[in-house]
Amino acid sequence: MTIYFDEEGAVKLPLSCEETAEFAARTALDVLMCPYEAQINLLLTTNEEIRRMNKEFRQIDRETDVLSFPMIDFPSPGDFSRLEEMEDCFDPETGELMLGDIVISKDKVLEQAKDYGHSILREFSFLIVHSVLHLTGYDHMKEDERACMEDLQRMIMEKAGIPR
């Protein structure tokens, strides 16, 4: 797995963000039984920047904790079976499955960890897991999708050994 990592803003999270992101993403892909090595672009940013991006890409003028930009339109969530038939899913240099981009507000990580009463490690890892599910076709717009995604998130976080 390759994480292309970038960070902006003065706030620093008190953990190894790149290693933590790779572990959480790899655990999620293992639970989803992804048969490929994968790559993800990860940007850690500020509330101001994520608000700007949220407005630009989703027409929602407020900050958010995480944005996910999938590279693949999965036929059904977590269905990796037909990806080899699709042309642009794999990096021609590495052969890795290109899942997409994740943008996380470091300010929101700190705020939500405090609000929810759990560790910064847990909050950051959860946002990575949540985004990897989005990058692999999962969503939570309908009740059945939400329940499925919550079950998967819980299972992945348990497998990762990162309690609530």
Image: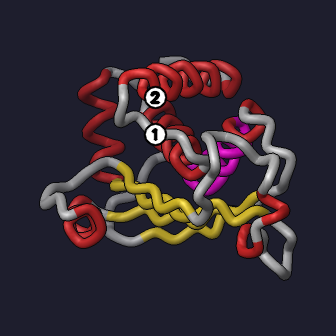
Find residue 50 and report its horizontal and vertical position in percent.
Answer: 28, 63
Magenta stretch in the rendered image: 15-27
Mark 1, secondary structure of its residue: loop
Q: Residue 160: name its quadrant.
A: top right
Residue 159 vertical position relative to residue 91 in the rendered view, above or below: above
Q: Residue 116: name its quadrant.
A: top left
Q: With 162 as the anchor, is 7 left or right in this view?
A: left
**Residue bearing the label numbered 1:** 139
User: Which amino acid, mark 2?
Assistant: Glu
Residue 107 vertical position relative to residue 5 in the rendered view, above or below: above
Mark 2, secondary structure of its residue: helix
Quadrant of the rendering where the N terminus is positioned: bottom right
Find residue 138 and report its horizontal and vertical position in percent.
Answer: 53, 40
Residue name at image x 76 percent, y 67 percent: 86
Magenta region, main secondary structure: helix
Residue 120 vertical position relative to residue 50 in the rendered view, above or below: above
